[in-house]
Image (spheres, rainbow, N blue to C red):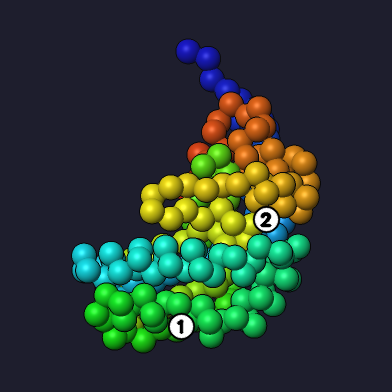
Amino acid sequence: MRYISKSKLFFLISVLTLIFALTITYAKNVGNNISNAVLRLHIIANSNSACDQDLKLCVRDRIISEAGEFFSNCQNLDDAIRITNERSQEIKKIAESEIQDYGFDYPVKVSIGNFAFPTKSYGDVTLPSGRYTALRIEIGEAKGENWWCVMYPPLCFADGVLSVTDAAKTQLKSDLEQSEYNLITQKDSGAIPVELRFKIVEIFQNIF
């Protein structure tokens, strides 16, 4: 049986450590650039009861349908944030109206902030985990499971139908480096699927 010398083992560990560090750094930089190009939507249900979870999805559909058009003329994240701040009360009323239509009287809290998101795929677009600026809608006690998507560029889906439009991809492409765009749209030639790569990085980031 052949044994690896201590010097070779040290060299191998050093190389693997360097590769891992570079991978983490690259993924973090890509994540930072992407987080500066999108506005996420985060809806939190009152509880995990079946009724409250169904209500969350109804609010989701109504928000995407009626508030989604608010962001149609945005050119960048700053525009999207400005529109959110200007129309937050309208967004709140849309959510309240949907809740009342289903016979509930839960209060609604609408805010915009910087929140942690896991790796998530929308069709052929995958966004890495990280902190993103998001429009957060909290229903009632906001103790239930949450739902998230992207309001700008519009990568959300409603009624189970995914709608990643060409316009949304074009906006992402203009806001990112070509290599970053290729990575998140799974057009790069890596042997490991991009979602799995982001998940691996996410796991190690959580550990360290």
Residue 190, disc? none
Taking 97 as reference, is 117 left or right? right
In terms of image quadrants, where is residue 94? bottom left
The structure residue drawn at horizontal position 56% and vertical position 59%, both measured from the top left corner, is: 150
Q: Amino acid at mark 1?
A: Lys
Q: Which residue is mark 1?
A: 93
Helix, strand or loop under label 2: helix
The structure residue drawn at horizontal position 64% and vertical position 57%, both measured from the top left corner, is: 153
Q: Is residue 132 visible?
A: no
Q: Amino acid at mark 2?
A: Ile
Q: Is residue 189 visible?
A: yes
Q: Nearer the viewer, mark 1 or mark 2?
A: 1
Residue 19, image x, y percentages: 67, 38
The structure residue drawn at horizontal position 63% and vertical position 29%, both measured from the top left corner, is: 190
Q: Identify which residue, 65 or 113, lies in the foreground.
A: 65
Q: CA distance from mark 1 to mark 2?
A: 30 Å
- Residue found at the very far left of the displayed protein: 50
Q: Which residue is mark 2?
A: 34
Helix, strand or loop under label 1: helix
Which quadrant would the C terminus be assigned to in this image? bottom right
Indicate which disc, 1 or 2, sits on the residue closer to the N terminus.
Answer: 2
Q: Residues within 10 Å of mark 1 (few under 14, many from 20)?
A: some
Residue 31, image x, y percentages: 65, 54
The structure residue drawn at horizontal position 28% and vertical position 64%, both measured from the top left corner, is: 54
